[in-house]
Image (cartoon, rainbow, N blue to C red):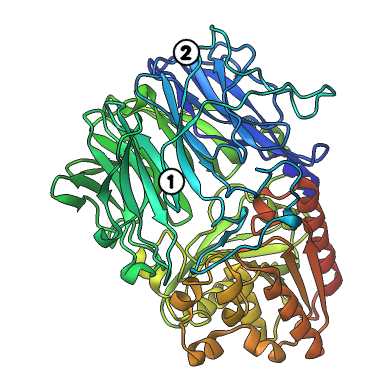
Amino acid sequence: MDPLDIQLLTSLSRPAPAPDGSFAVLAASRPDLRADRAVGQLWRIELDAPGTPPRRLTRGIADTAPRLSPDGTTIAFLRPDERGRRQLHLLDARGGEPLRLTDQLLGVASFAWTPDGTQLVLTSRVPEPGRYGSVEGLEPAAESPRRITGPRWHANGTGYVLDRPTQVHVVEATPVDGEPLYPAAPHPTEDVEPTPVVPAPTRRLTVALAEHGPLAPTADGAAVLVVREAYESERRDLRTELVSVPLDGGEETVLLTREDGLRIRDLAVLGDGTLVLLASRPGDGRDSVAPDVAVWLLEAEGPRRLTDPEQLEITGPLVADGESVLVTAPRRGRVHLLRIGVDGAVSTALDGEVEVQQVAVAGGGAHAGGTALATVGTPDSAGALLEVRAGEAPRVLWDPHEELRSCGLVAPRELEVVGRSGHPVHGWVAAPAGDGPFPTLLMIHGGPHAAFGISVFDEVQTLVAAGYAVVHGNPRGSAGYGRAHGRAVRRAFGTVDHEDVIDLLEGALAADPRLDGERLGIMGGSYGGYLTAWIIAHDHRFRGAIVERGFLDPLSFQGTSDIGSYFGDEYIGSSAEDIARRSAFAVADRVRTPTLVIHSEQDLRCPLEQGTRYYTALRRAGVETEMLIFPGEDHELTRSGRPRHRVERLDAVLAWWERVLSPSPSPS
């Protein structure tokens, strides 16, 4: 796979199936180098006509998030306006021209239909007066200063948030066969004057200084249930509230407060009105390490937990399915689909060699055990649409990755080694065809509570195509191996995780003589950047390293990162001794390995200062080092950055490894 082949990676959205199960709509998007952005449209899949090719419904540049009305006749979706801000549009499910429904100044973040299909509830950021274009002609540099008194004020990918919190709104749905309330805005690439748009008649339902979402309308459509995360005045608190907001503008009802102790990640309303939550209990309001995510029922007496997070590791989305819900479960690099009944019974809906990404149920989840639609990643696909029926083998409805498979994808070989401490370490080795010897790279994922998986991974495939073997696995701290495994690195960064990745590397070298143990490199991003920087300060076997968007100095991270108020405290510790003991920055003077530092200018998760200060420390220590800074990008560069930047990054990575890993075989 060549760096330019990232254009072949198509992402599929959450499917929107018709109530009768006859068809489904979803968005397909991919990186486009010419447009230098992700481009995508809506597609219709005929479920009752197997073999019928998908039919494109829209031709916008970035149409996303389709949701069918309860009667299945109308599609609501998001499309950017002439300012690039996503607005709500409506489209006849058979096709045609979409009608623009909203004109939110800062765009629409999320939305849902009410049960009767007459309204849509949505979330949208609301700016303080005088900010973000709310006053025509007032440039950002001329805005008043921001007064900050609490621990939280910004977010990666957004910027300042305290002065533009997400609020809940409601808007009437316009029948697509009636007179449109708003003319559709022209496509941003069309060479025409923008169509004037009358301000949309959205009614704002919430006013609290808080982030609102996710949300779900009640079964009777009288109110919307919404998760509220209020801005704190003192210490950071990850716990959330749950409120019921009447759509007629009446007084809201608080169903759960922060004192109830839950951080709600998703919610679903069953057909009989039962409210199901996907939530964790962050200890002292701040413990985010391998959270104890579980399915909960909200009953009259309060929330009741249905699943045991110590025994069952689950993630979202949470999807209603009759008297049960569907959730996903990470398992050793796979992600499976589970059904959880309101009685707590757990059954498997989809397993095997898949990573489930998005899920929906035909009929809106009103009928238990109905047809589920799931988008999944597999060893030879970045995203395919499957139909999942109880008792039947899953059926592939659409996989847009045929051309990708012609790029010579390599199937990584799975392995598990027993480390020096006796702890098993699970991972993979991806290597080129042939006898070798191949220069070998140890790749470390971010998180740390994340995981490498079995789906096509462009970074691994690109490196293998260039002649490198890549060892990548899931050390302690990763997800998918039980909660204890994930919490093993709490206040212990650089200990058992360091041990595990080195044990995996040595096990891979011992198992495959084609891997050259003399030409070794190490690389990682975010937490993986931390562990890379930590290891090269203690282990000098590597000929080169890449430290990308790293969490490097826990002390400065406290005041610059959007998660600095709690992340380092939980994973490193808060005392000066803890920070000094586990700081990669503090041991930068021990590094001898040539190192490329990569960072993004707008990264607010691991801010740019983490990279620039580490680069400077390496230079002062006499280390051969370079720094690559991407303008306009944030922490998500490698996943959703501008396509040209993603290609330039891969080119730079390949050039670095070619430079520091000699092409000649090792003396051994």
For label 1, the crowd category at 10 Å Cα-Cα, with few meaning under 14, some 14 to 19 and many 20 or more, is few
Instruction: Give coordinates of residue 190: x percent, y percent.
Output: 81, 24
Query: Residue 110, image x and y in percent?
Result: 50, 37
x then y, percent, for residue 126: 55, 44
**Left or right of residue 549: residue 483:** left
Q: Which mark is residue 73?
A: 2
Could you tell me which residue is drawn at 43 percent across and 82 percent down?
A: 421
Question: Dot 2: few (<14), some (14–19), or many (≥20) neighbours within 10 Å?
Answer: some
Which quarter shows the C terminus? bottom right
Q: Which residue is mark 1?
A: 207
- The amino acid on which the numbered mark 2 sits, given as a three-letter code, is Thr
Q: Is residue 550 left or right of residue 475?
A: right
From what the image shows, is residue 347 above or below residue 449?
A: above
| Position in image of residue 537 (x %, y %) | 66, 86
Give 17 or 208, whichever is nearer the viewer: 208
Kindly report the distance in space between the C-alpha atoms of the residues bearing marks 2 and 1. 33 Å
The reply to whether residue 545 is visible in this rendering is no
Residue 546's image quarter?
bottom right
Marks 2, 1: nearer the viewer: 1
Q: Secondary structure under badge 1? A: loop
Q: Residue at x 71, y 91 (%)?
A: 589
Q: Residue at x 61, y 24 (%)?
A: 42
The mark total stands at 2
Q: Which residue is at a point 73% across and 21% down the rendered structure image?
A: 195
**Marks 2,1: beta carbons within 8 A:** no
The amino acid on which the numbered mark 1 sits, given as a three-letter code, is Val
- Quarter occupied by residue 230: bottom left
* Above or below: residue 30 compared with residue 494: above
Q: Secondary structure at mark 2?
A: loop
Quarter location, residue 52: top right
